[in-house]
Amino acid sequence: MQHNVHVLVADDHVDFRKCLVKLLDFMPEITRITEVANGREAVDQIAKQWHDVVLLDSDIPVLDGLQATRQIKAQWPQIKVVLLSVDPYLRAEALASGADGFVAKDEIVPNLLDLLTSFTAGDTMI
């Protein structure tokens, strides 16, 4: 994994978001983690400060994850966007919206390092 990876976590469930941030904190390659609670904040934050990877909940307020993904990828196609959802059936819709990856929320913990490693190495994870 490359060094100095900047990650944005967008999820309106505070406990899940904080847990994900704590897991990311253990990865020395990640040097900046930003947290937001909705899709509009995610897009606005990226406009202010670069992020390499966005972990985006599919069901967030203001702009849902699919809408935010489309906006992010339209403006910054090189940013890797991973849509997270409790609904595993959203995978095809997530990828169709431009997401680089999709992970069911109950699969994120065991797959987090592999996911981030694949993206920073230039691979695609679906």
Image (tube, rainbow, N blue to C red):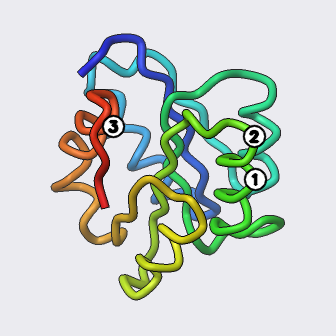
Q: Quadrant of the N terminus?
A: top left
Kind of residue at disc 2: Gln
Q: Quadrant of residue 123?
A: top left
Work out whether 74 lies above or below 38: above
Mark 2 vs 1: CB contact within 8 A: yes
The residue that mark 2 highlights is: 75
Q: Which residue is mark 3?
A: 119
How far apart are labels 3 and 2 at the CA level? Answer: 19 Å
Look at 42% across and 21% down and name the residue there: 5
The image quadrant of residue 49 is top right
Q: Residue furthest top?
A: 3
| Residue 45 % position (x, y) | 75, 34
- Tell me the CA gap for discs 1 and 3: 20 Å
Q: Say which residue appears at 50% left-offset and 24% top-offset.
A: 6
The amino acid beneath tag 3 is Phe
Residue 63 is situated, as x and y percent measured from the top left of the image, at 79, 65
Labels 1 and 3 touching (C-beta < 8 A): no
**Residue type, numbered disc 1:** Gln
Q: Earlier in the sequence, mark 3 or mark 2?
A: 2
Quarter of the image with the C terminus is bottom left
Locate residue 6 relative to residue 110 in the image: left or right: right
| Residue shown at the point (51%, 58%) measured from the top left | 99
Q: Is residue 41 left or right of residue 106?
A: right
Marking on residue 71: 1
Disc 1 crowd, CA 10 A, few/some/many (<14, 14-19, 20+): some
Q: Is residue 116 above or below residue 69?
A: above
Q: Position of residue 60 (x, y in %)?
A: 67, 68
Looking at the rendered structure, the secondary structure element under dot 1 is helix
Q: Secondary structure at mark 2?
A: helix
Q: Residue at x 39, y 64 (%)?
A: 102
User: 37 and 66: which one is in front?
Assistant: 66
